[in-house]
Image (tube, grey):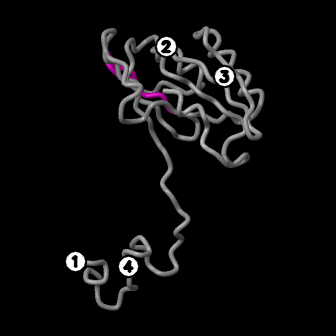
Protein backbone atom coordinates (compact mmCIF):
# COMPACT_ATOMS: atom_id res chain seq x y z
CA UNK A 1 0.00 0.00 0.00
CA UNK A 2 1.48 3.38 -1.04
CA UNK A 3 0.95 6.74 0.61
CA UNK A 4 -1.67 7.67 -1.97
CA UNK A 5 -3.75 4.61 -1.04
CA UNK A 6 -3.86 5.46 2.67
CA UNK A 7 -5.12 9.04 2.43
CA UNK A 8 -8.54 10.13 3.55
CA UNK A 9 -10.79 11.53 0.80
CA UNK A 10 -10.05 15.22 0.24
CA UNK A 11 -6.75 15.17 2.20
CA UNK A 12 -3.60 16.59 0.55
CA UNK A 13 -1.72 13.86 -1.30
CA UNK A 14 1.57 12.58 0.10
CA UNK A 15 4.05 10.46 -1.81
CA UNK A 16 7.09 8.35 -1.06
CA UNK A 17 9.18 10.70 -3.23
CA UNK A 18 8.64 13.63 -0.84
CA UNK A 19 9.20 11.61 2.34
CA UNK A 20 5.50 11.42 3.06
CA UNK A 21 5.28 15.19 3.59
CA UNK A 22 2.12 16.98 2.64
CA UNK A 23 2.55 19.81 0.13
CA UNK A 24 3.54 23.09 1.78
CA UNK A 25 4.89 21.48 4.97
CA UNK A 26 8.30 22.58 6.23
CA UNK A 27 10.66 19.78 5.20
CA UNK A 28 13.64 21.55 6.83
CA UNK A 29 12.45 20.60 10.30
CA UNK A 30 14.54 17.80 11.68
CA UNK A 31 14.83 15.76 14.79
CA UNK A 32 17.09 17.02 17.55
CA UNK A 33 19.22 14.87 19.79
CA UNK A 34 17.60 14.98 23.22
CA UNK A 35 19.43 12.32 25.23
CA UNK A 36 22.48 10.12 25.23
CA UNK A 37 23.03 6.93 27.20
CA UNK A 38 26.50 5.99 28.37
CA UNK A 39 27.46 2.76 30.12
CA UNK A 40 30.14 3.35 32.75
CA UNK A 41 32.24 1.20 35.08
CA UNK A 42 31.87 3.23 38.27
CA UNK A 43 28.76 5.39 38.52
CA UNK A 44 29.76 7.89 41.20
CA UNK A 45 33.13 8.60 39.55
CA UNK A 46 31.43 9.20 36.20
CA UNK A 47 28.66 11.36 37.71
CA UNK A 48 31.32 13.55 39.38
CA UNK A 49 33.30 13.89 36.14
CA UNK A 50 30.38 14.68 33.81
CA UNK A 51 28.71 16.96 36.36
CA UNK A 52 31.88 19.08 36.53
CA UNK A 53 32.65 18.81 32.82
CA UNK A 54 29.15 19.61 31.52
CA UNK A 55 27.96 21.72 34.45
CA UNK A 56 24.65 19.85 34.29
CA UNK A 57 22.38 19.01 37.21
CA UNK A 58 21.98 15.48 38.52
CA UNK A 59 18.21 15.10 38.64
CA UNK A 60 17.99 11.37 39.37
CA UNK A 61 20.60 9.13 40.98
CA UNK A 62 20.03 5.59 42.19
CA UNK A 63 22.35 2.66 42.82
CA UNK A 64 22.87 1.77 39.16
CA UNK A 65 22.02 4.82 37.06
CA UNK A 66 21.93 8.61 37.04
CA UNK A 67 20.41 11.30 34.86
CA UNK A 68 22.17 14.60 34.21
CA UNK A 69 20.15 17.38 32.59
CA UNK A 70 21.49 20.53 30.97
CA UNK A 71 19.89 23.98 31.06
CA UNK A 72 18.48 23.43 27.58
CA UNK A 73 16.88 20.11 28.59
CA UNK A 74 19.39 17.77 26.97
CA UNK A 75 19.95 14.63 29.01
CA UNK A 76 22.85 12.28 29.69
CA UNK A 77 21.97 8.94 31.24
CA UNK A 78 24.82 7.14 32.98
CA UNK A 79 24.37 3.45 33.78
CA UNK A 80 26.81 1.45 35.85
CA UNK A 81 27.89 -1.78 34.18
CA UNK A 82 30.57 -2.73 36.74
CA UNK A 83 34.35 -2.58 36.71
CA UNK A 84 34.72 -5.64 34.47
CA UNK A 85 32.43 -4.38 31.71
CA UNK A 86 33.87 -4.49 28.22
CA UNK A 87 34.54 -1.26 26.38
CA UNK A 88 32.54 -1.22 23.11
CA UNK A 89 34.77 1.23 21.20
CA UNK A 90 35.46 -0.14 17.75
CA UNK A 91 32.18 -2.02 17.38
CA UNK A 92 28.85 -1.04 15.86
CA UNK A 93 27.04 1.79 17.65
CA UNK A 94 27.82 5.28 18.87
CA UNK A 95 31.52 5.54 19.60
CA UNK A 96 31.68 8.98 21.21
CA UNK A 97 29.89 12.31 21.30
CA UNK A 98 31.32 15.63 20.16
CA UNK A 99 30.21 18.53 22.35
CA UNK A 100 30.23 22.23 21.36
CA UNK A 101 31.32 24.94 23.78
CA UNK A 102 29.34 28.19 23.78
CA UNK A 103 32.53 30.31 23.59
CA UNK A 104 36.33 30.16 23.81
CA UNK A 105 36.31 30.55 27.60
CA UNK A 106 34.01 27.53 27.93
CA UNK A 107 36.32 25.52 25.65
CA UNK A 108 39.26 26.45 27.90
CA UNK A 109 37.28 25.40 30.99
CA UNK A 110 36.47 22.04 29.40
CA UNK A 111 40.13 21.51 28.50
CA UNK A 112 41.11 22.24 32.11
CA UNK A 113 38.51 19.75 33.41
CA UNK A 114 39.78 17.09 31.00
CA UNK A 115 43.40 17.67 32.05
CA UNK A 116 42.40 17.06 35.69
CA UNK A 117 41.17 13.56 34.75
CA UNK A 118 43.25 12.57 31.74
CA UNK A 119 46.92 12.70 30.87
CA UNK A 120 46.04 12.39 27.18
CA UNK A 121 44.54 15.75 26.19
CA UNK A 122 45.15 17.43 22.85
CA UNK A 123 44.06 20.71 21.29
CA UNK A 124 44.16 21.52 17.61
CA UNK A 125 42.55 23.89 15.12
CA UNK A 126 41.07 22.49 11.92
CA UNK A 127 39.02 24.33 9.25
CA UNK A 128 38.27 27.33 11.47
CA UNK A 129 37.29 25.51 14.64
CA UNK A 130 39.24 24.28 17.64
CA UNK A 131 38.92 20.71 18.89
CA UNK A 132 39.92 19.62 22.40
CA UNK A 133 40.07 15.89 23.06
CA UNK A 134 40.70 13.92 26.22
CA UNK A 135 39.27 10.87 27.95
CA UNK A 136 36.60 10.45 30.59
CA UNK A 137 36.79 8.22 33.65
CA UNK A 138 36.17 5.02 31.65
CA UNK A 139 38.70 5.97 28.96
CA UNK A 140 35.90 7.00 26.57
CA UNK A 141 36.96 9.83 24.24
CA UNK A 142 35.52 13.22 25.21
CA UNK A 143 35.67 15.80 22.43
CA UNK A 144 34.67 19.47 22.57
CA UNK A 145 34.75 21.97 19.72
CA UNK A 146 34.38 25.72 19.34
CA UNK A 147 32.81 27.18 17.37
CA UNK A 148 30.16 24.57 16.64
CA UNK A 149 29.04 23.39 13.21
CA UNK A 150 26.32 26.06 13.02
CA UNK A 151 28.99 28.80 13.14
CA UNK A 152 31.80 26.93 11.34
CA UNK A 153 30.28 24.35 8.98
CA UNK A 154 32.39 21.27 8.38
CA UNK A 155 33.51 20.75 4.80
CA UNK A 156 35.26 17.42 5.15
CA UNK A 157 35.22 14.37 7.39
CA UNK A 158 37.46 14.80 10.42
CA UNK A 159 40.45 12.46 10.12
CA UNK A 160 39.89 11.71 13.80
CA UNK A 161 37.05 9.29 13.04
CA UNK A 162 39.35 7.03 11.00
CA UNK A 163 41.82 6.50 13.87
CA UNK A 164 40.16 3.41 15.33
Q: Which residue is mark 2?
A: 137
Q: Is residue 100 above or below residue 29?
A: above
Disc on the earlier residue, 3 or 1: 1
Q: Quick one: SS at disc 2?
A: loop
Q: Position of residue 59 (x, y in %)?
A: 45, 27
Disc on the earlier residue, 1 or 4: 1
Give residue 14's quadrant in the image.
bottom left
Bin the neighbour count of mark 4 within 10 Å (Cα to Cα): few under 14, some 14-19, many 20 and up. some
Give the CA separation, mark 1 to mark 4. Answer: 11 Å
Q: Quick one: SS at disc 3?
A: helix
Between 144 and 54, the one nearer to me in the picture: 144
Give the CA separation, mark 4 to mark 2. Answer: 48 Å
Q: Which mark is nearer the camera, 1 or 2?
A: 1
- The residue stretch that appears in magenta: 60-69
Q: Is residue 35 above or below residue 66?
A: below
Q: Position of residue 132 (x, y in %)?
A: 67, 25
Q: Residue at x 53, y 26 (%)?
A: 57
Q: Which residue is mark 4?
A: 15
Disc on the earlier residue, 1 or 2: 1
Q: Quick one: SS at disc 4?
A: loop
Q: Are marks 1 and 4 in contact (CB under 8 Å)?
A: no
Give the CA separation, mark 3 to mark 4. Answer: 46 Å
Q: Which residue is mark 3?
A: 110
Disc on the earlier residue, 2 or 3: 3
Q: Are marks 3 and 1 in contact (CB under 8 Å)?
A: no
Disc on the earlier residue, 4 or 2: 4
Bin the neighbour count of mark 2 within 10 Å (Cα to Cα): few under 14, some 14-19, many 20 and up. many
Amino acid sequence: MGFEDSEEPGAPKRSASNGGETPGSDQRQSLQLASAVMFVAELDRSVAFYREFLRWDVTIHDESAALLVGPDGYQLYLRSMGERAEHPLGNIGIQYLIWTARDEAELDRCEHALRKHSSRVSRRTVEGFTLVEGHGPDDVPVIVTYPGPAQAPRHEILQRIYQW
